Image: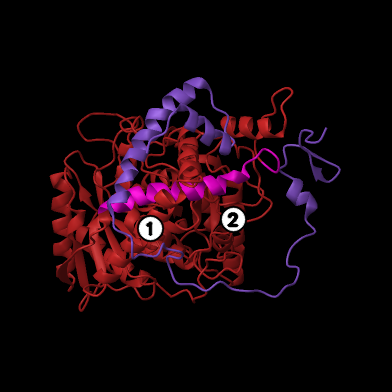
Chain colours: A purple, B red
Amino acid sequence: MSVDHATVRKIASLARIAVTDDQVEAMVPELNNILGWIEQLGEVDTSAVQPMTAVIPNALRLRDDVVTDGDVRDAVLKNAPQAEQGFFTVPKVIE
Amino acid sequence: MTNLTDLGIAAIRDGFQAGDFTARDVASAFNDAVAGAKALNAFIAETPEIALAAADQADKDRAAGSLKPLSGVPIGMKDLFATKDVQTTAASHILEGFVPQYESTVSGKLWNAGAGMLGKLNLDQFAMGSSNETSFFGNVISPWRRNNGDTAALAPGGSSGGTSSAIAARLVPGATGTDTGGSIRQPAAFTGISGIKPTYGRCSRWGIVAFASSLDQAGPMARDVRDCAILLENMAGFDPKDSTSLDLPVPNWEAALSTDLKGKRVGIPKEYRVDGMPAEIDALWEQGIAWLKDAGAEIVNVSLPHTQYALPAYYIIAPAEASSNLARYDGVRYGLRDLPDGANLQDMYAATRAAGFGDEVKRRILIGTYVLSAGFYDAYYTQAQKVRTLIARDFDQAWEKCDLLLTPTAPSAAFGLGEKSDDPLAMYLNDVFTVPTSLAGLPAMSVPGGLDALGLPLGLQIIGKALDEQTVLNASLAIEERAGFTARADKWW
């Protein structure tokens, strides 16, 4: 499988990364080179193999359903590019 | 008086406890070394005042008779660990100026053990790279140079390149690294130092900027095996805040160090004899085999048949996880925001991420997004996870015949900056010997074995069974004793 210009634009859009025409031009052969190389995995017979879910066997733990965190609003907002009145602010999303 | 910056972790700890010097003297000596090594660009942030404050506390604790395991020892911290009130960037523009309001579990453990912080060490951006050329804050330069008069700047390896450069240049006695596909072991090999990636789950990932969560693992880097054991004891341990943290006691690795390998079987995987590997690396591998035999081990040949598929599987799995993990950088909650005039929320996300991520990070996010996208998920991602199962099974089958594996750490000595940076694939291939272990979550260590014809360090890798860091450390120490590696980079910076 290989990607074309339209596919690269689509992926970049899904990944929320703005790309210029020049960047798309450069990325198409670069990504195809990498994708062409990883294609070789297709030659491995995995019909009887389960995909790995955990490298080291480890049961997921449950903890008591109690509050363990919180009341740190100012710390949470401390690194926000823009915060007002205790909230993160973003460009208007509803007209 | 000895030059304090020539001392390693154990020597500083023991000398300080014995009253040979004050912690302030040690911290001051390393602070001076750091301040005098700007040419290496090993640090993103220097924190001499934090190192001195920890040293003063250690001096007080000594006077009060309440010493901690790392009292008096200053270290470096890879800038991937969140450090409270100290900028943490992952070497990216998007996190430039980010000042965490919390401390990562691993760094917190080290500070609680009495260590002080000399600074935040440079790395490849978001730990994505093998040469430390993807940092937004510039390349890290290795203190090593070729011995043929060529003064070309060499790569310190990556992603923990600031860590490896700083240790090799004696700017810090030891430091933290993280390893996703070889980011502790390969830089250690390139700079003539030691580094261990423990079993996945030994060290908490909480507060470490995430790259590929099923692979990321913190570990120590230092000048020798004992120093790594000391640091690892103070980094590892169960953390309820990391769901993949292993709820197991931390062994006393340092106390149990032994170079007697009688009864241990060391496997030599034939698939690691790759085409085009320099003869010197093959020769060092043979030498390593002889050293381990000398230490009492039995050598057996083993096969890890799926080795050649480890790298392509890794370059599906790691970018897939990265594309998901890095979705959090949205210009809303922390880090950079790029808001073009008249932009809506979606435009802001895209502009912020375009401006904040470097080329290699974008490349991996795009690959990851592609392999996870509808219609391709099974062919790429599911297939890679199945191959990962086969790679882990290869190791399980090898353990029926042996207790350890010995391989070279990297297929070459350090290369020059710029030599591979135009070809992502050539760069990826540098991790050919380290990635399989990462995919299987196993502990592995690199120790220096010797120098190549150009006077550059070469490393040997010891791979162990899950949770058997002790045997890995012991075999590494057996190699270290026999290699007698004392070479160091001549100071030019």
B108 vs B27: above or below:
below
Q: Nearer the viewer, residue B244 or B119?
A: B244
Residue B333's quadrant in the figure?
top right
A13 vs B171: above or below:
above
Q: Which residues are magenta?
A: B308-334
Tag 2: residue type? Gly
Dominant secondary-structure state across the stretch colored magenta: helix
Output the chain of dot 1.
Answer: B
Tag 1: residue type? Ser
The residue sitting at 60% across, 66% down in the picture is B61
Q: Position of residue B46 (x, y in %)?
A: 55, 42
Q: Position of residue B75 (x, y in %)?
A: 49, 53
Q: Nearer the viewer, residue B41 or A27?
A: A27
Total numbered badges shown on the rendered structure: 2
Q: Is residue A47 visible?
A: yes
Q: Nearer the viewer, residue B164 or B317?
A: B317
Q: Position of residue B266 (x, y in %)?
A: 21, 69
Label 2 sits on residue: B207
Q: Is residue B7 visible?
A: no
Residue B193: mark in rendering: none
Label 1 sits on residue: B438
Q: Is residue B325 left or right of residue B146?
A: right
